Structures are given as C-alpha cells and as structure tokens.
Image: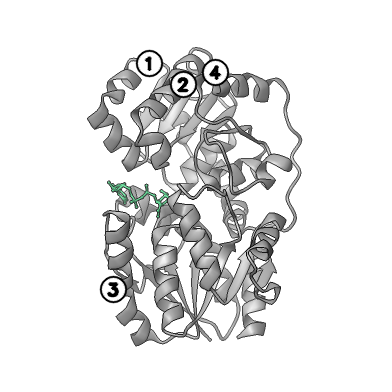
C-alpha cells in the first residue's frame, strides 16, 4: 500500500513524524513524503526534519510565502502532476494549514482516497483562516481521524457520515512522548541562563493578534507587567518578527528588560523550554495540547479554542487579548495548580491506531 503524506508548515512536521514512523513499522506500507514548501526557513522547516528524524521529502513543491489565494493556488497547481505521477492508494493530510486544504482538494477531485488526521476541531470562528481550512477539508475527505470527542460531535452536527470518522487520539502527543527524554538533555536552559520553573514562555503568530497593532499592543502591555515578576522568553515566529520591525512595537519590546526575544527554536529545545516553564502564554493550537500533557499552566491569548479538551481536562485557560484579562488569568493560574488528566487516547499510540485502521480500510 502506497500512502502519500503531505506536509507544509511547522506543526505538520511534528504530526507526520510519528505517522511516518508507524507506517515504517508496518510491513507493506510505502510512504511518499511531499513538502509543499509553505514553510522553508531552516528554523521553521529543516531543523524539524533533523530533530524528529523525518526522512527528506521525496518531493518539495517550493511554493514559499504569499497571500492565501496565491499560496493555496500555487500548491494545487504544483501538487496535481506530482500526485498523478505517484498514483498512491491514499493521500494523507494533517492539521489545518493552507497546504492541508490545497492538497486534499486536488486529491479528492482526482478521485484519490483522502485521509485527514486531526479532523473535527472547530473554533466556530470563521475569521480564522485555519477554521475555513478545517471545515472544507473535513467536508471532502474520505476518512477522518479525530483527536478528542468534541471532534466527533462537531463532524456529526455538520452531517458527516459517522462511518468515515475514527477517534484515534493525538499524533502530536505521540511525537512529544517519543522525544521527551531527548528534550530533557537539551542545554537551552543553560544557554538562556534560566532556572527550572522560574520563567514564562510566549509564542504569538495568529494574524488576528500580530497583524493588528492595537491587539498586539494590548498583549505587550500585559507582558510588560508579567516581566516585572518573571523572566519572559519570546521565541518569535517570522510573521511576528516582520510585524514588530515595521510597526514600532519592536522598540517597545526592547525596552522591557526582562523579556528576551529569540529566533524560533527547534523542537527539542522548545519542548525543554516549555516543559520547565512556570507558565506559557500562546495563541498556538498545538501548544495548548502540549502544555496539557506536560502539566504546565497555559494562557491562550484568543477568545476561542478549537481544542476545548485542553480546558476541561488540561491546564489551558482562555484569556483573550485584553490586558487586564490576561493579567487576571496569569495570577489565577499561578495561584492554584490544575491536576493533569490525560485525555483519552493521548497515550503515545494514536499513529499506530491510524495506521492499523488504514490497513483495514484500504
Ligand atoms: C501557518 C499556518 C498556521 C500555523 C502556522 C505555524 C495557514 C493559513 N497558517 O501560519 O495555521 O499555525 O503556519 O507556524 O496555513 N515565513 C518565513 N519563513 C518560513 C515561513 C514563513 O519567514 O519558513 C514568514 C513569511 O514572511 C510569511 C509569514 O512568515 O509571509 C507567514 O507564513 P505563512 O505560511 O503564510 O503563515 P504562518 O503565519 O506561518
């Protein structure tokens, strides 16, 4: 059986790493890896292949950055001949990035069986590009693998036939569990002169937060207060970096002595940094899930989450982007530690479940 796996952006690499390993362990599965090139910088792409032991992509479409229409259209144009040439038994897409939707659309229209891993998540916020990608990808794929029970509920309420849906757990957590020991040996705390449990980590990259001067300014106002209390490490996504360079907020950040902005980290260093943090503030989806498993308090700087289990079972708290609300959340989450309850099937074996089901189905 030949499966063509699609990756494009940073969170995709983390998910596909464990799926490819599970495929490798099953005899009779041939994997072809296509990288769309949506992310292309060393620290947004290559590092992850090295650290997570992902084989070099068989094909790189090298689409690079662009508007949503340009990027999605270019991926579709370049993916179609590659798919026809490889003619796999199935195409597997993960997550909710532009590469996910673009390749699913091409594959389904050409009549290939198409699999979506991490289906069913919904923020119910259609201003998020990822929400559009999720809804559309789920509506056209043949097999849908969900990470949490809400995913099942959401897909059913959209009228999707339940025979297509499988609750398998979280492949990103497989990767985390596999690399935790290696991450424990990372030198990042020494490199940044940090003591265990003494600092906060911030990541921001959502257009609704970092493309909007006022919103980003309110978040920085909150960080300005928090850095009086603890050191704050801010590994900066290129979108965020480009914005603060052009809108003047970079100067403001530089004036805050206890905030350290650094380049995006690789997987292993970031996992270590997150694991030993006192608190994480983020607008990432994946980090909400990772902090849940690590038991590290997480403040999500958004008004909604497509991953509600990280609140009901995990350490996540939605605090939006209002300065006061962020600061209240900060004090509240540090005042009482939430016990860790591992969500069902976030046990490090989700990828194995995906592959076993695919072997049955195909
Ligand atoms: C994309 C995903 C988002 C995911 C995020 C993880 C979509 C719609 N968004 O957002 O869901 O959470 O990846 O990072 O697919 N850039 C670089 N080097 C790179 C990649 C990007 O410098 O390797 C810069 C470019 O200036 C680019 C900008 O970052 O224009 C944004 O990149 P893009 O891929 O458009 O979206 P992300 O914000 O990374």
- First along the sequence among labels 2 and 1: 2
Q: Residues within 10 Å of mark 4 (few under 14, many from 20)?
A: some
Which image quarter is the C terminus in?
Answer: bottom right
Which of the two discs, 2 and 4, sits closer to the camera? 4
Q: Which mark is residue 256?
A: 1
Q: In percent of the image, x 49 and y 25: which residue is there? A: 194
- Determine contact: label 2, label 1, CB under 8 Å: yes
Report how far apart the C-alphas of labels 2 and 4 lie in the structure.
11 Å
CA gap, disc 2 and disc 1: 9 Å
Instruction: Report the residue at 35% width, 85% height from top.
Output: 84
**Sequence-first disc among 2 and 4:** 2
The crowd level at tag 1 (other Cα within 10 Å; few <14, some 14-19, many 20+) is: some
Kindly indicate whether the residue at mark 3 contacts the one at mark 1 (C-beta within 8 angstroms): no
Q: How far apart in space, not on screen, are marks 4 and 1 (Cα)?
A: 18 Å
- In the rendered structure, the answer to whether residue 11 lies left or right of residue 81 reads right
Q: Secondary structure at mark 4?
A: helix
* Disc 2 residue crowd, few under 14, some 14–19, many 20+, Cα 10 Å: many
Quick one: SS at disc 3?
A: helix
* 3D distance between C-alphas at marks 1 and 3: 45 Å
Question: Which of the two marks, 2 or 1, is nearer to us in this view?
Answer: 2
Q: Name which of mark 1 and mark 3 comes first in the sequence.
A: 3
In front here: 212 or 277?
Answer: 212
Image: 273 above or below 325: below
Residue 19: x and y in percent read 55, 67
Whole-number angstrom distance, CA of label 3 to CA of label 4: 47 Å
**Tag 4 residue:** 324
As helix, strand or loop, the secondary structure at mark 1 comes to loop
């Amino acid at each position: 059986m030949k499966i063509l796996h699609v990756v494009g952006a940073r969170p995709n690499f983390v998910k596909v790493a464990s799926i490819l390993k599970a495929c490798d362990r099953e005899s009779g599965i041939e994997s072809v890896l296509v990288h769309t090139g949506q992310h292309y910088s060393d620290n947004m792409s290559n590092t992850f292949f090295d650290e997570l032991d992902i084989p070099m992509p068989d094909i790189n479409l090298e689409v690079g950055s662009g508007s949503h229409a340009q990027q999605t259209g270019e991926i579709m144009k370049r993916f179609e001949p590659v798919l026809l040439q490889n003619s796999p038994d199935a195409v597997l897409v993960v997550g909710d990035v532009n590469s996910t939707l673009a390749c699913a659309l091409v594959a389904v229209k050409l009549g290939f069986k198409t699999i979506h891993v991490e289906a069913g998540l919904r923020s119910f916020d259609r201003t998020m590009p990822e929400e559009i990608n999720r809804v559309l990808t789920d509506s056209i794929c043949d097999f849908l693998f969900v990470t949490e029970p809400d995913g099942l509920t959401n897909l059913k309420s959209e009228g999707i036939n339940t025979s297509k849906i499988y609750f398998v757990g979280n492949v990103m957590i497989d990767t985390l569990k596999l690399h935790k020991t290696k991450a424990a040996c990372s030198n990042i705390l020494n490199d940044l002169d940090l003591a265990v449990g003494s600092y906060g980590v911030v990541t921001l990259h959502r257009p609704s937060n970092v493309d909007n001067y006022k919103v980003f300014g309110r978040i920085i106002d909150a960080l300005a207060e928090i850095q009086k209390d603890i050191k704050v490490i801010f590994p900066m996504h290129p979108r965020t970096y480009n914005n603060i360079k052009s809108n003047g907020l970079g100067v403001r950040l530089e004036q805050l002595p206890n905030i350290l902005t650094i380049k995006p980290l690789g997987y292993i260093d970031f996992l270590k940094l997150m694991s030993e943090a006192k608190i994480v503030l983020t607008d990432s989806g994946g980090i909400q899930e990772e902090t849940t498993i690590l038991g590290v308090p997480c403040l999500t700087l958004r008004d909604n989450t497509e991953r509600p289990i990280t609140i009901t079972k995990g350490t996540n708290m939605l605090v939006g982007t209002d300065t006061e609300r962020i600061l209240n959340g900060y004090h509240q989450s540090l005042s009482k530690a939430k016990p860790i309850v591992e969500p069902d099937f976030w046990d490090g074996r989700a990828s194995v479940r995906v592959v076993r089901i695919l072997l049955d189905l195909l």
